[in-house]
């Protein structure tokens, strides 16, 4: 099934509605009570289910390899990072009740929360760019191939993945090459050898892998891998290095999920810091 044939499926009211579902599943006591986040008057839980029905049906091993070949050439567009944020801002959606802020302002809130806690500047940069991979939507990718909990493909699907019952529609479930515990992998082979379901996490990791320290790259690549860093479902594929690096993934996730506020960051005051930060780590232009 080609992506172009199923682009009409737009199950979420907003790309951020997936994060609403995460807050329901994984509440944590931060500055705002969990029930105050994404408090829709009439929650459309069925749209989240439909999102994962499509995600679990179409995220196959072959699909992921196809998307890697298509997008990791980075031949769609070239622009400075600030132009990329402007590009991303066209995804602003009025249906997110947490905030009216555009994408850059939300990312600034994340990075400012990280900076306020005294983390290294590369960690702050991770907060700034972690959602930049959502530009995939602007290249014609459907929501289920951009956001959503990520998971390994090419091996049996864990029942710890959200809505595991929908994997009954995934052809890999019935393919003996892919439906065993290890599938195409070796025990404790390390996640660097594992293909994850396709989305903005893998895309931004691949874009940044030459520029950011490894700890930050783990944050980018696995921040949506909830079946592991919340449920520990894939210990059998991880090696010791993965476990050490996942401590940094755990540090990042609260900033990702709980940093939204209705107060807009003062971009004029913050601009010199972030322009210097981007110039320190990233090239003048990025390829998408």
Image (cartoon, rainbow, N blue to C red):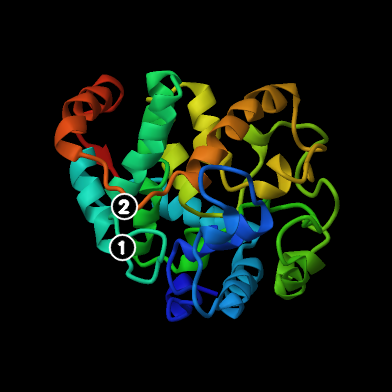
Marker disc for residue 105? none
The image quadrant that residue 15 belongs to is bottom left
Residue 76 on image: x %, y %: 28, 53
Q: Which residue is mark 1?
A: 91
Q: Is residue 229 above or below residue 39?
A: above
Query: Is residue 130 in sight in this rendering?
Result: yes
Sequence-earlier tag: 1 or 2: 1
Is the residue 279 above or below the residue 181 in the image? above
Q: Quadrant of the N terminus?
A: bottom right
Which residue sits at x=43%, y=81%? 8
**Residue 187: x %, y % from top left:** 83, 35
Location of residue 208 with respect to 258 vertically, above or below: above
Q: Check disc 1: other Cα within 10 Å, few if <14, some if 14-19, many if 20+.
A: some
Out of 131 and 157, give the one closest to the viewer.
131
Q: Which residue is labeled 2 in the image?
A: 103
Label pair 1/2, CB-CB below 8 angstroms: yes
The x and y percentages for residue 286 are: 26, 38
Mark 2: give few (<14), some (14-19) or many (20+) Cα within 10 Å: many
In depth, the one of 255 and 244 nearer the eye is 255
């Amino acid at each position: 099934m080609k992506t172009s044939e199923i682009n009409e499926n737009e199950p979420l009211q907003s790309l951020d509605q997936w994060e609403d579902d995460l807050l329901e599943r994984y509440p944590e006591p931060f500055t705002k009570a969990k029930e105050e986040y994404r408090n829709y008057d009439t929650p459309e839980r069925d749209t989240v289910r439909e999102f994962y029905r499509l995600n679990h049906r179409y995220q196959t091993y072959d699909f992921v390899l196809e998307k890697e070949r298509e997008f990791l050439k980075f031949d769609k567009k070239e622009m400075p990072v600030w132009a990329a944020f402007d590009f991303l801002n066209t995804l602003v959606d009025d249906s997110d009740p947490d905030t009216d802020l555009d994408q850059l302002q939300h990312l600034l809130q994340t990075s400012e929360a990280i900076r306020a806690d005294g983390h290294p500047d590369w960690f702050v940069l991770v907060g700034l760019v972690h959602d930049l991979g959502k530009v995939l939507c602007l290249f014609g990718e459907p929501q289920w191939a951009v956001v959503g909990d990520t998971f390994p493909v090419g091996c049996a699907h864990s029942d710890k993945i959200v809505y595991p019952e929908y994997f009954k529609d995934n052809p890999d479930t019935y393919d003996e090459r892919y439906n065993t515990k290890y599938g195409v992998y070796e025990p404790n082979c390390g996640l660097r050898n594992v293909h994850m379901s396709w989305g903005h996490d893998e895309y931004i990791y691949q874009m940044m892998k030459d520029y950011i320290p490894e700890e930050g790259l783990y944050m980018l690549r696995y921040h949506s891998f909830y079946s592991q860093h919340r449920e520990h479902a894939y210990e059998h594929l991880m090696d010791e290095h993965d476990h050490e690096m996942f401590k940094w993934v755990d540090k990042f996730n609260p900033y990702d999920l709980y940093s939204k506020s209705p107060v807009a960051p003062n971009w004029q005051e913050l601009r010199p810091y972030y322009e210097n930060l981007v110039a320190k780590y990233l090239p003048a232009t990025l390829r998408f």
